[in-house]
Image (cartoon, rainbow, N blue to C red):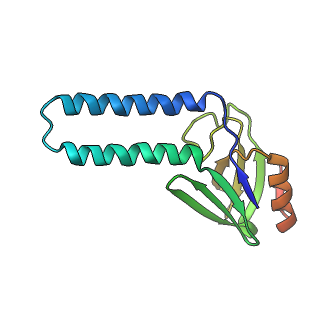
Amino acid sequence: MIFTSRKDKFYPLIFSGHLVFILLLSYLYLSGSGSWPYLFLFILLICIASLLASYFATRYKICEDYLTIRSGLYRKKISISDIKRIEQASVSKTASTVAGPAQSIKRTNIYYDDDYDLMSISPENVKGFIEELKMRNPSIEIT
């Protein structure tokens, strides 16, 4: 089963800000006498593609034994049997945009392996997501 990421309204502003900053740096570099303009443009396109892919392609897939988290170029596979606890995080706990592959500050924390490994995600259908994981691993603690 595939769950998409919840997207807050301010996330497009964050991504737009990143894109404008990258384009501004590109303009400044290319308007000067840059020595490697094609290499710079190639790197620029990779950065922009990565940002767009992480925004539009963040999803969480639950298979029989694994939870696969995908966000742009980032992929993480967690064994469902290794998941110890799922916590509905408060906004202040995970408000950082780099805390995990999510486009929302309202996140769900997944503790796995030795209960110190943490993944912050933001599935759109949190209730269905948790129910699906609990069905596959009833020993998961919900807090």
Left or right of 9 on screen, residue 127: right
Quarter residue 10 falls in: top right
Above or below: residue 17 compared with residue 7? above
Residue shown at 77% from the left, 55% from the top: 85
Q: Position of residue 124 (x, y in %)?
A: 75, 44
Which residue, as the protein is rendered here, is positioned at the far bottom?
65
Above or below: residue 77 compared with residue 99? below
Left or right of 25 on screen, residue 124: right
Q: Position of residue 62 (x, y in %)?
A: 73, 63
Q: Is residue 135 visible?
A: yes
Left or right of 83 on screen, residue 38: left
Above or below: residue 136 compared with residue 48? below
Q: Is residue 115 visible?
A: no
Left or right of 137 on screen, residue 94: left
Residue shown at 53% from the left, 52% from the top: 72
Count of numbered tags: 0
Which quadrant: the N terminus? bottom right
In the foreground, 131 or 93:
131
Q: Position of residue 22 (x, y in %)?
A: 36, 34
Q: Position of residue 76 (x, y in %)?
A: 58, 61
Residue shown at 68% from the left, 56% from the top: 60
Residue shown at 56% from the left, 37% from the top: 97
Quarter residue 65 falls in: bottom right
